[in-house]
Structure formats: structure tokens, C-alpha cells
Image: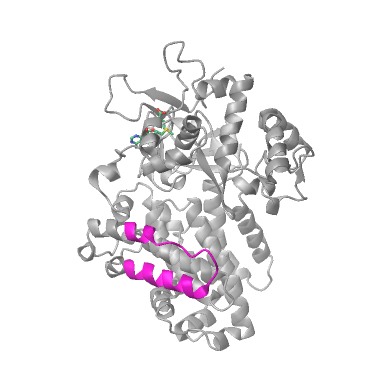
Amino acid sequence: MPPQLPSTLRIHHSPPDSSNNPKRRSLHATVPFPAGSTIATFPAPLLALPDGATMRTTCNHCLLPQSQSTGPLKACTACRAAVYCGAACQRAHWRAAHKGECGMFRRVREEVGKEWLPTAVRAVAQVMVALLRGGSPSMAEAFGEGKEEEGGRGEWVLEGNVEGFKREEAVWRDMELQATAAVIQTNAFNRLDADTGMAGIFLDAGLAMVNHSCVPNAFIGFDKRTAVLRAERPIEEGDEITISYIARHEALRLYHFDCDCSRCKDDLDVYQVCQTSPVIHLNTFSLQPDLSRLHNPPVDRSKVSKAEIETIYKKWQSLTTPEGDDEAEHLKLAQTRWELCRPLVEAKMWAVEPLPTTILQLATRWQTSYKMVVYALPLLCFLSTECDPYKAVAPFMPWRIKGIVAIIKLLAVTGEFTASGALATRCTHEGLVGTLAMADQVSMCEALLRLAVHHGSIGAAEDWEVLKEAKSMLEDLESLEGREQESTMLRRWAKDPEDPEAAAFFEDQVLRPINTLSSFAVETLEAMLAGKSLVKK
Ligand SMILES: C[S@@+](CC[C@H](N)C(=O)[O-])C[C@H]1O[C@@H](n2cnc3c(N)ncnc32)[C@H](O)[C@@H]1O
């Protein structure tokens, strides 16, 4: 039986003579969807694998990481490679895939002394075993088994772009069992985990029908072994559903097609895409509630041309990241990247890549550095107010929620430093010290938590680790005594962000300090990159 598509979706086939239409098939909505609603779930994928070595620290069936499991993960006693969070997952995975691969892992351990295989190799092996053993009609259909003799391609045969891959010699040479690998590469999604980064791949024949757009109307999230397709903007009945592939692959180059979306056709930058977004208004409840800034971003395009941005991006990508943890080497790379981005800085085009990533990389390093942690705060505030809202206009996009939760975590640290008096003795930036000393950091945290919990409940699965953490932090804050007045005000603001009194409270107690902190970002970043110490010895 071919895969069942959720009833909210249908596949459209381009007429066979439309050879200039590279999309071939596309997914369309059978009913309308408001922004943030769930379009469909895909709970029975053909493949759902943890990434490479993380198969030793992630349940191989439900994909729960060890860090989120209540007990230790237990290894399969035969191969001792695949691990599980419990007997039910182990049994289900034995039937779904492990029966066919267990012996391979045992031999790899005995003969090569390795406990895991690269994701692509394991994925190809699972597909090949399923095809050889038979018994999986969906897999056979997806990979085109037996269709050639019947003189045609089945409806569910996945696109492989094999000819395109062959032209990419370096990629082609590296592929094991290339044709199968090409199909997987073209259709599988990187399953991204909030805290651990990329956590494996996910392949579903129905979901694989979704095409790419640089102005997508939908996005995919993962909840254990299930993929959830959600609307990023309002979708009408009959509309084509599109997502951005860039999140699952470094570049569209790997897909071997020229994108025909409205952004590519008109060569629009991220600000121009934001300006036309139908969900700008949702930002009234966000860290960028001044909608006029989203409609008319204060950028100066005369300072940098599109061709220059392209060159900056290519040069930026060609710089190699140091492998070790040598502080001086990382600083040198950050300096080079920042200098490369200088024309974007002059144009105040903070949301145009590679500038936000350059800032994020520094913030991420500083966040975990005992000396620099305070300086990560202005950077994260800057990213959440000046970059993320333009890059992901809907405030329920998980990326934006992650940014907010990162600020909350830093405020917990700076709150302690402020209370103990350690801040002023460690930090030479008077503005930063003064702003934090004057601010009600607890109210700031509460407001940010309310944003994260509200939007997280729309854009992510209920047991998304970031959301769970935000909910539990909010509960803790709500139980604190002596701040009933502030909490009541913030609750009122969360209920109605336009309630004048509550909005004024938010503006004064939360937004103002966040924007002031954000205004220190570029100067602290430049001072640090110029080697001027902002940390008291
Ligand atoms: C995951 S498949 C999507 C389903 C595909 N249209 C099909 O019929 O199998 C990815 C392939 O679809 C095509 N595709 C997806 N988005 C496209 C776009 N925006 N412009 C042109 N081709 C696209 C490319 O051939 C790409 O490699």
C-alpha cells in the first residue's frame, strides 16, 4: 500500500509536458490554515535516524537524547551499538529497522572496532535491507523498486537528482551506493534538536513532496519520531505548501535546481521579504512591537550592493573555523569575519547574512566564558531585536523563542552578579553595569518567559525542551513572594499587549532596558575585537 497522505494535503502533478517545471510534484492545502496552526503530522517515516555517533546517546527509536531521558539508555545486547530508552522502543525499532542492521553493527564492532556508522551509510543500509527483504511496500515504492519493468515511475517514487549529483564529482565520489544516497539526500530532512544541534535525518515519502521557497509559508518541527508541518503564514485552500530547505542543507546547490520563488525572481533581501509579510502584526506581542520598524526598516542600502553582499558571503564561508579551542585563533577569525561584514554594518543591515551569524557565534562563545558572559547579554538582546524579527517574522518560529530563552538564562547570571555586587567589580562598561543595576531583572525574565511560553506553545511541540524549561522557570518566578504587583501587570500585558497601563509597564520595565542593552552590542563587540579589555583584572 502506498503511503497515506494526511487529508489536509493533496499532491499536485505537473503536466508531463511541462519539462521546464522542475518541481514535478507539489503539496497543496485542501483546507485553509491560520498562521501557527498545524497542517499535518507525519508519524510513520521511512527513515528516522540519530546522527552518526549520537546513536550511542540517543534512543534509536523515539530519538530522545540521553540528556532528556529519565534513566540511562540501554544498548541492544546483540550489537551493543543501538541504544533505547525502554523495552517498548527497542521492540518497535527491531521490527522497523534494527533486525536488518543489527548483524552489520556487530561485525563492524568485531572487525573494525567501531561502535557506530556514519548516518548516510546507515540510512542506505536500512533502505537496502528493507528492499532486499521485501515486506515494506512504501519503501519499495519510494525507491522505485520494480517500476522500471512495468514501464514507468510510480506515483510515490522519490526524486533523486542523480544526474545533478553525478555532475558534482566530489559529492558523488564520497557517496556510498550513490543512487540510493542521492534519493535520501534529496528528500530527507535534517532533524534538528534544540540543544544538541543536528540530531539525525528523517525521511517520509509524503513530506518529501514539499517544495522549497525562500519565502516559505510553512515550516517543519520534530517531536520524537514525528515530523510536524506548521503554517508560518496564513494559507488558503489550494495554496502550494512550501518550506525552506536551507535549514536542512547548507545550500540549495545540493538540490540541483534554480529556485523559482518570488524572493529569488525579484532578488529581494531579508528586509524586503519581511516588509511584505502578512504576519508582521503578530509582533505586537514580541520584543519588536514597534511594527513601523518592521514595515520600514532603518537600513541604508546605498552603502552596500547586492553583488558586494554576495562576495562578502562567499569570502566569509571560505574562512575555516579553528578546530581547537585556542582563544587567540578564534578571536582572529572573529576579527576577520567582522571586518568582512563592515559594509553591512555601515548599511545597518544587521539581519543580512553573514552578519547575524557572525554576532551569534561571538555571543555563543562569550555565553560560556566566565570572563565574558556579561558581554554576551547585549549581543543576544541585539540579535533578538535587530536581527531575528526580520529573519523570522512570525514570533512563534522556534529560532526566535530560542533567542529569548538564551537572554533569560543570561539574565539569571547577571541578576546574581548584580545582587552580589560582583558586576561592578568585573565589568568596565559603565552603561552596562548601570543599566543592569537599575533594571528589574526579575520582571524582565518574567516578561520574556511569557513571550517564550505563549509563542512556543504555537510553534513547537509541547515537550520541546526549550519550552518545557521556560514553563518551569515561569512557574518558579510566579511563586516568588513580594512581586505580586509586577506579576499582575505582566499577566495583564500577556493577555492584552495593547492594554495601555500594562503596555506602558512592559515598555518601561522590559523593553527599555532590553533596547539599552542592545544599543551597547556593537561598541562592546568592536572594543573586544580591537583587543580593548572590558573586563576588570
Ligand atoms: C524533496 S523534493 C520535492 C518534491 C519534488 N518536486 C518531486 O516531485 O519529487 C526536492 C526536489 O524538488 C524540486 N524543487 C523543490 N523546490 C523547488 C523550487 N523552488 N524550484 C524548483 N525546483 C524545486 C527540485 O528538483 C528538488 O531537488
Task: Examine the rendered structure and indicate whether residue 23 appears above or below residue 358.
Answer: above
Residue 355 location (% of width, % of height): 37, 63
Magenta segment: 314-340
Which residue ends up furthest to the top in the rendered image? 150
Residue 173 location (% of width, % of height): 45, 39
- Foreground residue, 40 or 267? 267
- Foreground residue, 508 or 531? 531
- Foreground residue, 306 or 420? 306
In reply to whether residue 35 is colored magenta, the answer given is no
State the image quarter where residue 105 is shown: top right
Q: Ligand 1 is found in which quarter of the picture?
A: top left
**Is 337 displayed left or right of 304 in the figure?**
right
Residue at horizontal 65 percent and vertical 64 percent from the top: 478
The main secondary structure of the magenta stretch is helix
Residue at horizontal 79 percent and vertical 39 percent from the top: 77
Task: Examine the rendered structure and indicate whether residue 461 appears above or below residue 383.
Answer: above
**Is 137 displayed left or right of 355 in the figure?**
right
In reply to whether residue 329 is colored magenta, the answer given is yes
Task: Examine the rendered structure and indicate whether residue 327 appears above or below residue 389.
Answer: below
**Is 511 displayed left or right of 346 in the figure?**
right
Q: Is there any visible trace of residue 216 in the rendered image?
A: no
Task: Examine the rendered structure and indicate whether residue 421 appears above or below residue 47.
Answer: below
State the image quarter where residue 415 is shown: bottom right
